Image (tube, helix red, strand yellow):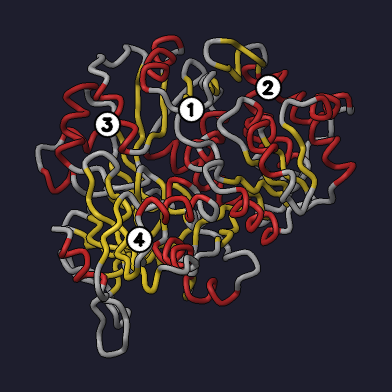
């Protein structure tokens, strides 16, 4: 079989063109050139191949670290599958992902390794530890030849049932995402930088490939977390800086009161609603540097987009939209009967194209429900205007998007109901100027809020806990016994 699409090719090309230029930075410190990064990835891949056969899943559970870049490329070079794990999850939730994916190994940062090792069903490799260092003693692996339909990335998104589902993204899917980003959103070159401020397990990590392909340096904050002042300092220190941020992160940048560094060329935002008022304030503070993407784990970062030029519009309806269909993606709004909605008519957003996942890992029922006749049913409701701009209207699934993170109410409700003093629980999202939305729990029972907080800390990630508990005598229900969440939302004003 001839050489085919493997994401390692993006690094291979960058190393060939820009071998001696800086590739990976921790803060302002250069760690590796492109040639060195390629060498490290292939040596690590050689070590992985000794212990793992092609197609095995290799998980990565870590705060943002420079090593994540070489790990991604090493896993692809070994023809294995990257399983990025949200570092904010509770260790028990991480174990669910390891078990469901059948991961053979998990690479974990020191902090997470300490918590995960006693619970993990698989071997935990310490990122940056002595054993990790020994892996680079292996001779470089040969550059792989891969069928483009081969699984490359298993992206876990919380399911409405409370258990994570793994969206299967092939090398073809992520190549389509890469090309669409370069075609539609950003056009970096070797004099540019990608700053990893958002989690590399999600959007920021997915955007490694397009920036590597163009030779743009990869910059990870020394702190490993998003600190607005540190971020702006790094933007000033690195040329042609771009970053993917959640809207709440942009708000924190605005709150610093600082001017945009001259080298900050683009902020791509997504992962949650960006209200028009907040967007206008951000543009007033930092200038016309913003672009928006709308996507999901099932169609990574790529359904529609609002380009930088679109942000020049004086029309609030355009600024409040999520733009129009991305290159290589067909987007449709469908009515309940399956017909295409007219402009202005609300329906379910669907899309199709090479970027869309091939299905959910070991979950044929969920796959059949979500992928129908080649179309991905997003569960989001929206409408097109006459010019093709899509506006999100509501979500048919009950996901709460808080600070760019998806929180599924049923998952929180099930954890709450494990407490003996909770008879009923219903979780909804409430608008919030800082977080976009916050989780609010309506409780029938006698357990106090602080008791429930402590109870949840043992079961779910901290960021999923309700910001407020409202105690009620009963929950409003329809004749079938289904809780009427819209009535509960109405009570929040």
Crowding near pointer 1: few (<14 within 10 Å), some, many (20+)?
some
Earlier along the polypeptide chain: callout 3 or callout 1? 1
Which one is in front in this view, the residue at disc 2 or the one at disc 4?
Answer: 4
Residue that appears at 64% across and 58% down: 96
In what element is the residue under mark 3? helix
Q: Which residue is mark 4?
A: 331
Q: In the image, what residue occupies the spot 60% across and 20% down?
A: 24
Earlier in the chain: of badge 4 and badge 1, it is 1
Q: Is residue 371 left or right of residue 33?
A: left
| Helix, strand or loop status at disc 1 | loop
> Which of the pair 165/30 is nearer the observer?
165
Residue 309's x, y, as percent? 24, 33
For marks 2 and 1, give the one nearer the viewer: 1
Spot the residue most to the bottom. Answer: 479
Circle 2 residue: 16
First-in-chain label (2 vs 1): 2
Q: Cα distance, mark 4 to mark 1?
A: 35 Å
Marker disc for residue 140: none
Foreground: 451 or 193?
451
Real-space Cα separation, disc 2 to disc 3, in angstroms: 39 Å
Of 224 and 313, which appears nearest the observer? 224
């Amino acid at each position: 079989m001839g050489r085919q699409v493997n994401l390692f090719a993006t690094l291979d090309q960058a190393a060939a063109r820009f071998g001696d230029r800086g590739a990976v930075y921790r803060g302002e410190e250069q760690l590796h050139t492109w040639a060195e990064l390629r060498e490290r990835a292939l040596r690590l891949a050689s070590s992985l191949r000794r212990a793992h056969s092609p197609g095995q899943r290799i998980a990565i559970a870590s705060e943002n670290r420079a090593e994540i870049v070489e790990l991604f490329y090493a896993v692809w070079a070994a023809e294995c599958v990257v399983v990025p794990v949200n570092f904010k999850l509770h260790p028990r939730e991480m174990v669910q992902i390891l078990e469901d994916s059948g991961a053979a190994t998990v690479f974990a940062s020191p902090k997470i390794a300490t918590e995960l090792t006693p619970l993990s069903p698989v071997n935990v490799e310490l990122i940056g530890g002595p054993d990790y260092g020994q892996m680079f003693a292996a001779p470089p692996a040969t550059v792989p030849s891969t069928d483009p339909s081969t699984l490359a990335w298993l992206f876990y998104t919380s399911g409405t049932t409370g258990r994570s589902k793994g969206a299967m993204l092939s090398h073809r899917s992520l190549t389509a995402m890469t090309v669409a980003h370069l075609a539609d959103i950003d056009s970096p070159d070797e004099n540019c930088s990608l700053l990893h401020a958002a989690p590399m397990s999600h959007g920021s990590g997915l955007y490694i490939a397009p920036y590597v392909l163009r030779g743009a340096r990869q910059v990870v904050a020394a702190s490993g977390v998003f600190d607005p002042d540190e971020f702006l300092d790094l933007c000033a220190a690195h040329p042609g800086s771009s970053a993917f941020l959640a809207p709440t992160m942009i708000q924190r940048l605005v709150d610093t009161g600082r001017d945009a560094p001259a080298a900050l060329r683009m902020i791509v935002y997504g992962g949650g609603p960006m209200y028009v008022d907040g967007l206008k304030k951000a543009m007033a503070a930092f200038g016309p540097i913003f672009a928006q993407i709308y996507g999901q784990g099932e169609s990574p970062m790529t359904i529609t987009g609002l380009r930088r030029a679109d942000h020049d519009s004086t029309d609030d309806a355009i600024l409040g939209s999520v733009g129009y269909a991305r290159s290589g993606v067909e987007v449709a709004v469908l009515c309940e009967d399956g017909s295409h909605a007219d402009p202005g008519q609300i329906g379910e957003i669907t899309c199709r194209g090479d970027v869309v996942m091939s299905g959910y890992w070991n979950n044929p029922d969920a796959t059949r429900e979500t992928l129908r006749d080649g179309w991905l049913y997003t569960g989001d409701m929206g409408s097109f205007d006459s010019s093709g701009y899509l506006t999100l209207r509501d979500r048919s699934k009950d996901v709460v998007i808080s600070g760019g993170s998806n929180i599924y109410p049923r998952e929180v409700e099930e954890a709450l109901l494990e407490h003996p003093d909770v008879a009923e629980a219903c979780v909804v999202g409430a608008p919030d100027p800082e977080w976009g939305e916050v989780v609010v729990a309506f409780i029938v029972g006698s357990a106090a809020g602080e008791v429930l907080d402590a109870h949840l800390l043992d079961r779910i990630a901290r960021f999923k806990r309700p910001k407020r508990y409202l105690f009620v005598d009963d929950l409003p229900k329809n004749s079938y016994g289904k809780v009427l969440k819209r009535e509960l939302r109405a009570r929040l004003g």
